[in-house]
Structure formats: C-alpha cells, structure tokens
Amino acid sequence: MADNKKMVEQITSMDEDFAKWYTDIVKKADLIDYSSVKGCMIIRPYGYAIWENIQRILDTRFKELGHENVYMPMFIPESLLQKEKDHVEGFAPEVAWVTHGGNEKLTERLCVRPTSETLFCEHYANVIKSYRDLPKLYNQWCSVVRWEKTTRPFLRSREFLWQEGHTMHATAQEAREETVQMLNVYADFHEKDLAIPVIKGAKTPSDKFAGAEDTYCIEALMHDGKALQAATSHYFGDGFARAFDITFTSKDNKLEYPHQTSWGCTTRMIGGIIMTHGDDNGLVLPPAVAPIQVVIIPVAFHKEGVLEKANEIKDRLVKAGVRVKLDDSDQSPGWKYSEYEMKGVPLRVEIGPRDIEGGQFVVVTRHNRQKTFAPIDQLEKIIADKLVEVRDGMYEKALANREKRTYACKSIDEINSALTNGDGFVKAMWCGDEECEDKVKELTGVGSRCVPFEQENISDTCVCCGRAAKKLVYWGKAY
RNA sequence: CGGGGUGUAGCGAAGCUGGUAUCGCACCGCAUUUGGGAUGCGGGGAUCGCACGUUCGAGUCGUGUCACUCCGACCA
C-alpha cells in the first residue's frame, strides 16, 4: 500500500510548480487565510496550533537557560530608532510609520517595531547600574512589522510572529558564549523536533544584521533546493550600549559598557517545515509540533462496536500523552484519509469491524505511507515507537535531499554546471573579499548563505579570484 | 522597484462577431451509503475587481485604476 501515487488531485504537483504547490498547501491544509492587507495573513487554528507547539518547546528551553519573558511596546519613536546609525539604515526601507493619533498629527512619528533592540536598550539604560544587575536575559514573544514589497505566507509576511531574545552581559566573552549557546538551541530544536537538518555558521560581513558585530545563523535546504535562514543569533559587542549610554559599575568600581546579544526565530519556520517535508499529498508535520499526532478513523462505524472501540483507543492514547483526534464525522473513510494526509498528521489509526475481530488496529505513517497491522493490546508502545520512527524517517529523507543537492565546487564554471542539476547548496572557498562575494552571485545566481562552523578545505584558492582562500562558504539561492 | 500573468458565486473554470450569466467542487435538506476524496433527488448563493466612456443595450469593446500572483533585486 505504500505507493507514491498522488491521491489528492486538488493540489499542484511540487515538481510541476513548487511555488504554486506551496500556496496550495498553505491554504488547503487550513493554515492561513489571506486578509485584506497585502502580506498580512490570518493564521487559522490549525496553523496557530503549530506555532503554539513551537512556542511551548522553545519557551521551555529558554527558561531552562535562565531567560525571562517580558513585553515591550509595539511603537518606537523615530528619535529612539535613530540612535544607532547602522541599525536605522538597515531597517529604514521597511518600516511602517504611525503619523496620527485620532485626528491629530503626532509631534513625532512612531514606527511600528520591526525589531526591538532600541526599546530593550532604552530600558536597559534605566535598569542596569551595577555588575550585580548582569546578566540580563530577556526574551519576548510578539509580532513585528516589516513593509516587504513581495510577500508570501509564512516566508515573508509584513507582520509576522516571532520571539526575540535580548541579553546584556558584563564581558564580551560571556556575550559571545550566549550568542553561540542560543544558536545551538535553535539548531537542536530544528534537527530533533522539526526533523530539519541545518548548517550552523556565521553570516559574511555584508550579510550581518544591522548594527551587529557578528551574525550567526542556521541554514536549511528546502525540497526544491533553495536555502532558508531558519534562525539567527547576533553578537553586538558594546556598540548599542555606547549609542544608548548603557553603563554599569564593575566590581573594581570602574564604569563599563555591557556586551549585548539578540536572537530570534519566526513563523517562517512553519514555511520551512512545509517546504522541507511536504509532498504532493499535502503537509507532513514532525510529531513534536503536529497539532494532531494521531488521527483515528473508524471504518463502517455504524456497525456494532466500532465507535466504542475507536473511543477506547482515543482514551488510551490521551492517557499516554498523545495529541489525538477521533474523526467520527459522516464523511467517507477515503475522504478522511486524504483530509488528514493533506493536514500532515503523522500517524493515522484505522479501526473497523475486521480489525476488531482480529484484535488488531491499522497504523499508517504519513511521511512514507507505510501501513502496519498491530495487536491492539500493544497500542501505546506501538504508537510511541512509530512517532519516533516518523521523526527519524523525516530527518533522513530531508538530509538525503540536502546531500543530493550539495555540490562542492572549485570554480565559477563548476558552480554553473553543478546548478544545471537543480538548485542547492554550493560549497566553495572564498578569499574574504566582498567584491568576490558579489561577483559569484552575479555570475552564478547563488549568494553566500553562511560560513559554516565546520570548515573543510575544498581548495586553496578563492572560487572567484584565485587568490588564497580564507574560508569555506555555503552558497545558495535563498527564500 | 523592474519584467510577466490573472481578476466572472467560497474555490476552479466556460461565456463565440455585444442581447441581461453557465458548469464542476464546496455549502444546506432528505434518503441510501462507509477498508482511499460515495450516490440519488431537491435547494440557496454573482450588482462579472473598480471607475469612466462607446452603445438602444457591456462579463464581452475602449481608457484609466486597484488588487492578487509569479520571476528578478532587497529582506526573518
């Protein structure tokens, strides 16, 4: 039964038109609806439930590491935004402004936060006095606005949900450690919970966050071979602290500037989940964040005992801590199979008269459509095992796609010929010069994605200019 | 911001040389069904993106405009 035939005719095939496939999934799996403002999407219950699961897992980890949640205002006065020069320049083109309160024009216009560094800094200047006040490990869950020109659900919306951590430390070293630690939290979350393999690394100087000294990122490769920046973590040094006059008195009574970090991830991750794991039958969700982990489909439930047995299975799984749904609506079983495959539910349990007679149940794994008949007295164990198996299978599949689409290249020509096999990651050496970075993009279409922590030596010379190479860089087309 | 495409019911579409809107899905009701998107019968739902113009008459022709979407550039 584990054939790959496309069972759902309502969505565009991903090989035919990946972009169309993506928007079909987003709509047909009931994740979002469009609103009347371009780029502002309505996140529907099923989509929001995925976000809630992401939030719950990450929030727990943040708190385990000592972070506290706060809430900052959504408006930033123009003068405050302008305190750090690089920062304003980076964000100015995509800021939305509030100019009126009621009918009256404001004396100073307010920007709708595109990010909250400046707000945190303003506050930190007030509350940090002594080394005893450090570190400050704050995080907030909120939405931000960036007035993008082209928008796509989850991947690039004008308002999006995210989490932004902002921390202050007494020493540069401690701040650097925090930056890397949080990047590792994101990487771990992606690989273990979302089953998305990621490359950890640093952005090149031209690609750093506005105002940051170093920007780290995790990069994932989507099914179509385009890269997605899944999360970032920035080290600011004391640049913002100087601009905002944040000082503290050290143990030996000297006035010092604290060192700062910020790190964030967004609803874009949902787009990443879709494009990493989805297939022609719809969404495929990793069990850790799936709103429904197991859907129970009773077959011929008008017959004696079927619904009772289905409810019994549901109760046992709820007790075992599984997010489970029993669909006893009067749609046909076939309709339900398709519906929950579209929605990416990791496991489907079928229970019908024949199963009850044989003391068994049927379980089907979404990511590969494998069907298993299993004894019903081992229900809890089998479901738990299958959920792990699904996560592992999804990860392996995604990793295989990335490996298939990763090309090591020593010259521009090699890059161009590699890319004729389809988009993907190009691993190539770089001299460190921004000019070469731009030229590679111009000549091949792929831009620098990150300088991976795990360096390899592919060649001794820069892929572009032939001078001595400094770093291995991952290049790619990005979402 | 540059280049392409599309706007007719919730969705997808048809509508010829202009004559007052059609089909499928979805939705509602009833019945029969139920192991891969069931069937029959009945029903409701559209000022054809918007504006102006040509005409006795515009979904259809003209001008303008708006929105959405895809491909680039920029960006989480």
Image (spheres, coloured by chain):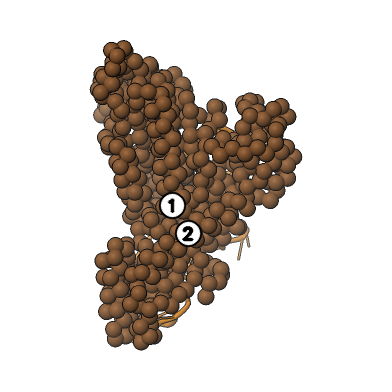
Q: Of the residues shown, which amino acid type is indicated by label 2?
A: Asp
Q: Describe residue A229's horizontal placement relative to residue A300 as left or right.
A: right
Q: Describe residue A104's horizontal placement relative to residue A157 as left or right.
A: left
The answer to whether B10 is drawn above or below residue A439 in the figure is below
Residue drawn at x 59%, y 49% as measured from the top left: A225
Q: Residue A266, image x and y in percent?
A: 40, 42
Q: Residue A234, image x and y in percent?
A: 44, 31
Query: Which residue carries the number 1 mark?
Result: A192
Q: Is residue A111 visible?
A: no
Which residue, as the protein is rendered here, is positioned at the far right?
A413
Q: Which type of secondary structure does the marked residue at label 1 adopt?
A: helix
Query: Which residue carries the number 2 mark?
Result: A392
Q: Of the residues shown, which amino acid type is indicated by label 1?
A: Lys
Mark 2 in CB contact with mark 1 (< 8 angstroms): no
User: Chain ID for label 2?
Assistant: A
Q: Earlier in the sequence, mark 2 or mark 1?
A: 1
The answer to whether A431 is drawn above or below residue A418 in the figure is above
The residue nearer to you, when weighing A52 against A282, is A52
Chain identifier for the brown-coloured part of the image: A
Q: Describe residue A114's horizontal placement relative to residue A467 as left or right.
A: left
Quick one: label 2, few (<14), some, or many (20+) residues within 10 Å? some
Q: Residue A433, image x and y in percent?
A: 63, 25
Tint applied to chain B in the drawing:
orange
The residue nearer to you, when weighing B35 against A62, is A62
Q: Quadrant of residue A16?
A: bottom right
Quick check: do tags 2 and 1 share a chain? yes
Residue drawn at x 48%, y 31% as measured from the top left: A215
The answer to whether A391 is drawn above or below residue A156 in the figure is below
Q: Quadrant of residue A237?
A: top left
Report, in whole angstroms, how far the alpha carbon at label 2 lies from the one at label 1: 9 Å
